[in-house]
Amino acid sequence: ALTDGMDDYEKLKLLYDRIVTGTEYDRNAPENQTICSVFLYGRSVCQGYAKAFQYLCQRAGIPAVLVTGTVEGGEAHAWTAVRCSGSWYYADPAWGDVDYQADGAQEKAGSAAEGSGTEKAAEGSGTREIVDYGYFLVPSRELFRTHTPDVPFPLPECSSMEDNYYVREGLYFAGADLEQAGRALEAAAREGRESVTFKCADREVYEKLYEELLAEQRIFQYLLDGAVSYAVSAEQLTLTFFL
């Protein structure tokens, strides 16, 4: 099977990527409340994304539960709770899809690009990475900032960060570590990625990393071009660089 030899994180990331990149957000998609919309038509809404991801997780032997509720503004929404290496996390594949954002659906908090335009730090254009991992394997404290679940049954405790995307990929910053930033930027460029996002542990780290990399322009120690496009979110404590 395709997932042979992978650990739970690697399996879940592969399945998440397949759902996000293989599905277009479309409010008018046929059968959009079922997995048929994803697997037969490649178009769906949040319920279809979540159910399809749940189905693939279960086929891969990973426990997954459909969760329904609302997001900011009171819009009905659906996502999943999944178990990864013994701990439970939340994952929202619809919010991982740029089509969802571009379609005018409920925007994620703090998703607007912020930047400063100079010849060495061009303002972020709003372009996002193909798959947004900001809501992939996140704990309750992170998800519940924007998502409010219905509670028809007790939800699993989601408190671990061990298999969070940013932690696993070396993109989670507990401090303003420029060596870590350099390694991450160089790895992203080496792998031919279009962008890389840094997630900061708190506001202090975010502000320090922003100051070091952008205000003081130390990012050019790692990027050879004379300009960089970026988007930052003080709400989500993220810095995204487009390579």
Image (cartoon, rainbow, N blue to C red):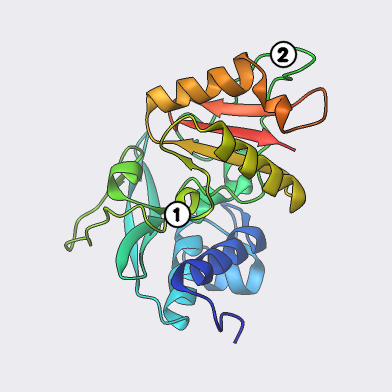
- Tag on residue 13? none
The image position of residue 157, as x and y in percent, is 22, 58
- Asked if one can make out residue 17 in the rendered structure from this viewpoint, the answer is yes
Q: Give the residue at mark 1.
A: 92
Q: Amino acid at mark 2?
A: Gly
Q: Earlier in the sequence, mark 2 or mark 1?
A: 1
Q: Residue furthest bottom?
A: 1
The image position of residue 109, as x and y in percent, is 44, 32
Q: Give the residue at mark 2.
A: 117
Q: Residue at x 39, y 50 (%)?
A: 77
Kindly indicate the quadrant of the structure image that contains residue 24: bottom right
Q: Nearer the viewer, residue 26 or 85?
A: 85
Quarter of the figure that contains the C terminus: top right
Relative vertical location of residue 132 with respect to residue 86 in this rendering, above or below: above
Q: Residue at x 60, y 26 (%)?
A: 113
- 121 sits left or right of 79 in the view: right
Q: Amino acid at mark 1?
A: Asp
Q: Residue furthest right?
A: 225
Q: Badge 1: how crowded within 10 Å, few (<14), some, or many (20+)?
A: many
Quarter of the figure that contains the N terminus: bottom right
As helix, strand or loop, the secondary structure at mark 2 comes to: loop
